[in-house]
Amino acid sequence: LDSLLQEIKLSTMSLRLGYKKSSRSRSKRAGLHFPVGRIHRLLRKGPYASRIGSFAPVYLAAVMEYLTAEILELAGSMARDYGKILPRHVLLAVKNDTEVDRLLEGVTMEGVLPNINPAPLILNDAE
């Protein structure tokens, strides 16, 4: 955060002195892969608030990038033998991690069947 603020200060000072502004995206300045500018635009266009601060999209992009990396890391460990990550691996990774499962509790993942074995269900009905 300090480096981001310092870079913004330097860029405004250089504009006053007549130097050309260097074109670096906010994602690059924050050290993120997720698009900060696009998230800021979507926040402004959406029905969330009339005013959006400049740091809100940076924070949101960082949180989204962290969650994506966490889920992909878990899915990659599930798909170690297979060679590539399938939607089934993502579902298994989410269901095996209790914190991520609680976060994505109401989310339905399309195209993936949970594959619950019916044998234990038949045994419970007989008892």
Image (cartoon, grey):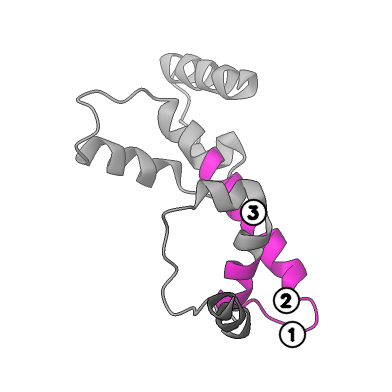
The structure residue drawn at horizontal position 61% and vertical position 61%, both measured from the top left corner, is 95
**Left or right of 79: which side holds 49?**
left
Q: Amino acid at mark 3?
A: Ala
Of residues 29 and 104, the one drawn nearer to the viewer in this rendering: 104
- Magenta highlight range: 63-92
- Assess whether mark 3 and mark 1 are in contact (beta carbons under 8 angstroms): no
Q: Is residue 124 magenta?
A: no
How would you rate the neighbour count of disc 2 (Cα within 10 Å): few for under 14, some for 14-19, many for 20 or more?
A: some
Looking at the rendered image, the disc whose residue lies closer to the viewer, 1 or 3, is 1
**Which residue is under mark 1?**
82
Determine whether 44 is above or below 49 in the image: below
Q: Of the residues under marks 2 and 3, which one precedes in the sequence?
A: 3
Kindly indicate the quadrant of the structure image that contains residue 87.
Answer: bottom right
Main secondary structure along the magenta-highlighted residues: helix
Looking at the rendered image, the disc whose residue lies closer to the viewer, 2 or 3, is 2
Q: Is residue 82 magenta?
A: yes
Res. 72 mark: none
The structure residue drawn at horizontal position 74% and vertical position 85%, both measured from the top left corner, is 82
Give the SS element for disc 2.
Answer: loop
Give the SS element for disc 1.
Answer: loop
How would you rate the neighbour count of disc 1 (Cα within 10 Å): few for under 14, some for 14-19, many for 20 or more?
A: few
Give the SS element for disc 3.
Answer: helix
**Residue 101 spot, x, y in % from top left:** 57, 53
**Residue 126 seen in the figure:** yes
**Which residue is under mark 3?**
69
**Which residue is under mark 2?**
79
Spatial separation of the CA atoms under disc 1 and disc 2: 5 Å
Q: Amino acid at mark 2?
A: Ala
Determine whether 64 is above or below 53 in the image: below
- Assess whether mark 2 and mark 1 are in contact (beta carbons under 8 angstroms): yes
Location of the N terminus by quadrant is top right
Of residues 95 and 38, the one drawn nearer to the viewer in this rendering: 95
